[in-house]
């Protein structure tokens, strides 16, 4: 699953708006206060300037994705991507396979994050560090501008891992119908 973003991060917009509006208001307060004859340290002038610049800065941060990323912590990004992966895993019914062997690879473009989520049948046999090689392979390929090849190679590695631990049974069917999702 490839998504443009795992969340909208509205808090980052607000923090960015404050980050830029506060110093702008602070720097311009003496100039505007002197011009309006209210004094160079008037809190009302500061508040007026702050409330003037905040919506502008808020919108600039909201619409400038590289700037918005600066106001989001790695922990928050990781949590949002994992939440999006879990939500998609259940929404798409990947947990409904007979042997609990559903796998979701979520690539979140804005966050620049790849997450592999597996069902309980796989988790009983394999440790999460097995999937780190797959994630690293996909990330490396994306960084080298080989997105399609990297994703295909990652899916191929997942197939090899699953084939080694969950051999095909005579009565197996395609329970997921090759679900591929993007937004």
Image: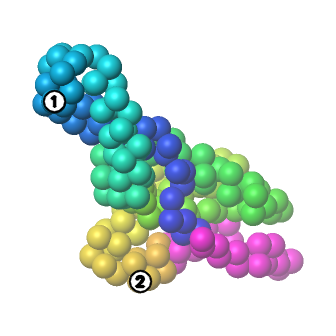
**Which quadrant holds residue 112?**
bottom left
> Circle 1 sits on which residue?
35
Relative height, residue 148 to residue 15 (above, below): below
The answer to whether residue 92 shows anywhere in this view is yes
Q: Say whether residue 137 is left or right of residue 41.
A: right
Q: Residue, x 82% and y 78% (percent of image)?
A: 173
Residue range highlighted in magenta: 155-183
Relative height, residue 150 to residue 104 (above, below): below
Q: What is the C-alpha distance between the residues marked 2 and 1?
A: 62 Å
**Which quadrant holds residue 90?**
bottom right
Q: Residue, x 70% and y 79% (percent of image)?
A: 178
**Residue 168: in magenta span:** yes
Give the crowd class for mark 2: few <14, some 14-19, many >=20 residues within 10 Å. few
Disc number for residue 149: 2
Q: Residue, x 51% and y 78% (percent of image)?
A: 156
Disc number for residue 104: none
Sequence order check, earlier mark of 2 and 1:
1
- For the residues bearing labels 2 and 1, Cβ distance under 8 angstroms: no
């Amino acid at each position: 699953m490839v998504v443009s973003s795992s969340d909208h991060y509205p808090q980052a917009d607000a923090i960015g708006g404050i980050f830029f509006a506060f110093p702008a208001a602070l720097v311009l307060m003496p100039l505007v206060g002197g011009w309006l004859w209210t004094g160079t340290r008037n809190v009302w002038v500061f508040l007026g300037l702050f409330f003037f610049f905040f919506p502008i800065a808020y919108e600039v941060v909201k619409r400038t994705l590289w700037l918005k990323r600066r106001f989001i912590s790695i922990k928050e990004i990781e949590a949002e991507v994992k939440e999006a992966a879990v939500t998609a895993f259940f929404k798409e019914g990947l947990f409904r396979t007979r042997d609990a062997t559903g796998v979701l690879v979520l690539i979140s473009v804005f966050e620049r994050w790849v997450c592999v989520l597996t069902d309980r049948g796989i988790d009983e046999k394999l440790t999460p560090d097995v999937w780190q090689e797959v994630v690293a392979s996909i990330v490396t390929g994306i960084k080298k501008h080989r997105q399609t090849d990297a994703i295909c190679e990652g899916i191929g590695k997942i197939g090899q891992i699953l084939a080694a631990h969950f051999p095909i049974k005579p009565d197996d069917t395609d329970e997921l119908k090759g679900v591929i999702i993007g937004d």
